[in-house]
Structures are given as structure tokens and as C-alpha cells.
Image (cartoon, rainbow, N blue to C red):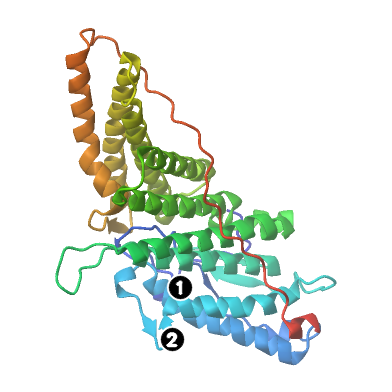
């Protein structure tokens, strides 16, 4: 995309693409890292020196912390921890402290919005560094990083862990429920970026954004977060004896809608580097997998009908689910093989159950219907999935108020 400043990789390990990112439950399309810059001198004419120095100090802290985090975000099994908790949690706190001060540059009446050139390294393409003279670009980059950190936290929660007693690896119910909340926070940051930050950037600066900050990619990751949250909910429903087939079908159909929107948002974007192509394959994999789940539950509900037609439609839906499941396995293999290589964690959650059940139930229902109805030459078209509105919404995130010092600057 139209970077105003790009240069080849010279920042060492921070920007070097890893060869192997290990197990992936939630794909994080790289962590963009800010470049160091001197803020106090350019701001000296517009802000009190004390505030300029505070802005510079806060950003310098983020530069150091994010450099370390960029090396661990794609290695969730080797995450680092500080005395106050995880490194990603500390970086999130630093970003939240930085934002109210940063927003002083774009407050009403300020003439500082385009005075500073902010520069970020992009992990999706390790040869790309994007610098724009736009404080809104800096706000957008901060929100993007906050969302990626949340997705990284969700990934760590959803990787199965072996218990102290040595039992087989699994994801605890507490971790599953916590991940749903984290997904909604991540989608909230991105929704805020799309609704309240992108529209405030000039057309020229929007053209200069790297592809991973384009509206299409931001929307795709936002819908990815919602889709993965619903996937966790479906897994919890499968484990609950109280959840009906109708509830499971609705969740699966909502998941399809999320992944379809993510897939469509990325369809025409020039994602040519390996991180971008891996991202596209992840979305396709989860979209096809979600359709397999939706057709499976739709088929089971249709099979509860009392007519030959409903039974044939059920078989068509279940056979479609089986075909989609096979396709999803192929796309998953392509995703994991794409550089940087990765692997699936031990099967768990909704898809572990569905991988076990779809083929078995499809074959069983087809055989029963063949025995019941003599005219097995009639082949029913695959029925359409029901259209449900997505119940989950991004957790609302509002840009913080300008800090007192910035407001008085």
C-alpha cells in the first residue's frame, strides 16, 4: 500500500519473520512496533515542555516494551511475565496511559495533528516501515496494537494445557469464558478505530496506510474476534446438556455470518506477503469450518421432521457438512504450511466434537433414509441455512478524555 516511507529490514530480530510460530488457536497477523522518535523538540512551540517530555517518555516506554512483546506474541508458549503480570498486560496499561496524552495533539483547536511524523514497523511485512505526519495515524496504530495484544491473550488462554496430575491437555471452562470477554474487547478496539478514527484521517493519509491498517483488514479482524468468541460459545453449548439443537444451530449460523464478513472484507486486498497470505488462509479455514458446523446442526434439526422431503433435505445438509469438513482440513493444512509454519493445538472445543460426529452421523442418516425410501435416485438440493442476526457485539470502547495536562496545553 502507499507507504510514505519504506525501507528494507535493518532492525534485527524485532522485524524478522519467525520460521515457526508453534500452536495457533487464534491467529495474530503480526504485531506492529513503533520506531523511536524525538517528540520534545518538534512540540516545543505548541505544548509546554513538561507535557512534551511526558509524551516522549510514554512513547519511549512503549517502544521498548513492544520490541520485547513482538518477539513473544508469536510464541505464546514462551510468553514473558513481569512482577505485575504478563508482559502484554503491562504493555496494554502503558498504551492506555499514553492515549489520553496523545489525544491532546488532536483536541479541538489544536494545530499539532500533522506536525509529528510517527513511524511504525509492520510485522506483516518485515521490509515495511510506515511513517505518516498524522497524530490520528498514531491513535489508529495504538488501537490496532491493543487489539492484537488482546488476541494474543485469547490465544494463550485457548491453548490446551496438561494438568498437574498429568491428564490429557485441555482448556478449562474458566479460560474459555475469559477468552470470550477478551475477544469482545479486541473487537471493540477495532470497531472504535473503524468508526471514530479512520473517518478523521485525511484522504491522503488514509491512502498512505499499510494494508494491515486498511478498513478491510480492520473489519476482518473485528469479525474474526466475534467469530472466535461464538466458536467458544458453541463449544460451551456442546458441553452443556441443557443446550438444545436449535441453540447450537443458531450459534453455528451466527459464526458463519461473522467469518463470511471477514472473508469478504479481505477478498480484494493486496495481501501478498506470507503473513498476509497466512491471515487470508486462516479466515478461509474458519469460514469453511463454521459452515460445516452450521450444516451439521441444520441437518439434525431437519431430520426431526416427519416427511420424506425433510429427511432427504437432512441428508443433503449432513453430506454438505461432511464435504465442508474435508475442505476445511485441506485449508487448515495449507494455513499451517504457509510461512511462518504453525500447527494446530490438540483437538478440543466445538470442532473436536464435530470432527468426531459429522462423518458418522452423515453416513448413518443416509443409510437409514435409503432403507426407508425406495426411490433413492432422488437427490435433494442442499437446503439454505437459516439467517440469524449475530447476537454478540463488540464491547463498546470510547476514546479516553484528553489528559488534564494536554487539555491545558
Mark 2 neighbour density, 10 Å: few (under 14) some (14–19) many (20 or more): few
Q: Residue furthest front?
A: 242
Which mark, residue 250?
A: none
Mark 1 neighbour density, 10 Å: few (under 14) some (14–19) many (20 or more): few
Hey, which quadrant is residue 368 in on the image? top left
Look at mark 1 in the image and give the residue it sits on: 10
**Residue at the image point whose x is 78% and y is 89% from the top:** 48
C-alpha gap between disc 2 and disc 1: 32 Å
- Compared across the picture, whether 87 is left or right of 128 comes to left
Hey, which quadrant is residue 348 in on the image? bottom left
Q: Earlier in the sequence, mark 2 or mark 1?
A: 1
Q: Residue furthest left?
A: 166
Hey, which quadrant is residue 397 in on the image? bottom right
Q: Position of residue 132 (x, y in %)?
A: 66, 66
Q: Position of residue 54 (x, y in %)?
A: 66, 88
Q: Quadrant of the image for the C terminus? A: bottom right
Look at mark 2 in the image and give the residue it sits on: 84
- Compared across the picture, whether 51 is left or right of 210 comes to right
- Compared across the picture, whether 288 is left or right of 265 comes to left
Secondary structure of the residue carrying numbered label 1: loop
- Closer to us: 240 or 263: 240
Q: Position of residue 8 (x, y in %)?
A: 48, 66
> Is residue 312 shown above or below 342?
above
- Compared across the picture, whether 407 is left or right of 123 comes to right
**Residue at the image point whose x is 33% and y is 16% from the top:** 307
> Is residue 374 shown above or below 155?
above
Q: Residue furthest bottom?
A: 50
**Residue at the image point whose x is 40% and y is 52% from the top:** 233
* Camera-side mark, 2 or 1: 2
**Residue 123 appears in the figure:** no
Secondary structure of the residue carrying numbered label 2: loop
**Residue 318 appears in the figure:** yes
Amino acid at each position: 500500500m502507499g507507504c510514505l516511507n519504506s525501507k528494507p529490514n535493518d532492525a534485527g530480530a524485532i522485524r524478522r519473520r519467525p520460521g515457526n510460530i508453534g500452536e495457533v488457536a487464534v491467529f495474530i497477523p503480526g504485531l506492529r512496533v513503533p520506531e523511536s522518535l524525538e517528540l520534545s523538540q518538534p512540540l516545543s512551540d505548541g505544548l509546554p515542555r513538561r507535557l512534551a517530555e511526558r509524551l516522549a517518555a510514554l512513547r519511549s516506554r512503549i517502544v521498548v516494551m513492544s520490541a520485547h512483546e513482538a518477539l513473544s506474541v508469536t510464541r505464546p508458549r514462551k510468553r514473558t511475565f513481569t512482577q505485575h503480570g504478563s508482559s502484554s498486560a503491562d504493555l496494554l496499561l502503558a498504551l492506555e496511559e499514553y492515549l489520553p496524552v496523545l489525544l491532546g495533539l488532536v483536541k479541538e483547536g489544536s494545530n499539532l495533528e500533522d506536525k509529528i511524523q510517527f513511524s511504525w514497523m509492520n510485522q506483516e511485512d518485515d521490509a515495511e516501515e510506515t511513517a505518516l505526519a498524522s497524530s490520528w495515524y498514531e491513535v489508529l496504530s495504538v488501537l490496532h496494537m491493543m487489539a492484537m495484544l488482546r488476541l494474543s491473550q485469547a490465544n494463550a488462554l485457548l491453548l490446551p494445557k496438561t494438568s498437574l496430575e498429568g491428564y490429557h491437555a485441555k482448556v478449562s471452562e474458566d479460560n474459555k469464558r475469559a477468552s470470550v470477554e477478551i475477544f469482545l474487547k479486541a473487537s471493540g478496539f477495532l470497531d472504535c478505530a473503524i468508526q471514530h478514527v479512520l473517518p478523521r484521517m485525511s484522504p491522503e493519509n488514509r491512502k498512505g496506510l499499510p494494508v494491515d491498517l486498511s478498513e478491510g483488514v480492520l473489519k476482518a479482524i473485528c469479525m474474526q474476534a466475534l467469530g472466535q468468541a461464538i466458536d467458544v460459545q458453541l463449544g460451551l453449548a456442546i458441553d452443556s446438556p441443557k443446550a438444545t439443537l436449535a441453540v447450537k444451530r443458531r450459534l453455528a449460523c451466527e459464526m458463519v455470518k461473522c467469518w463470511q464478513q471477514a472473508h469478504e472484507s479481505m477478498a480484494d486486498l493486496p495481501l501478498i506477503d506470507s503473513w498476509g497470505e497466512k491471515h487470508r488462509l486462516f479466515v478461509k479455514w474458519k469460514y469453511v469450518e463454521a459452515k460445516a458446523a452450521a450444516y451439521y446442526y441444520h441437518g439434525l434439526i431437519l431430520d426431526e421432521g416427519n416427511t420424506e422431503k425433510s429427511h432427504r433435505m437432512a441428508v443433503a445438509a449432513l453430506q454438505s457438512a461432511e464435504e465442508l469438513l474435508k475442505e476445511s482440513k485441506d485449508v487448515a493444512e495449507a494455513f499451517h504450511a504457509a510461512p511462518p509454519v504453525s500447527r494446530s493445538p490438540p483437538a478440543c472445543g466445538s470442532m473436536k466434537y464435530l470432527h468426531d460426529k459429522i462423518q458418522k452421523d452423515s453416513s448413518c442418516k443416509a443409510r437409514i433414509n435409503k432403507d426407508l425410501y425406495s426411490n433413492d435416485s432422488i437427490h435433494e438440493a442442499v437446503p439454505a441455512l437459516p439467517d440469524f442476526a449475530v447476537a454478540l457485539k463488540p464491547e463498546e470502547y470510547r476514546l479516553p478524555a484528553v489528559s488534564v495536562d494536554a487539555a491545558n496545553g
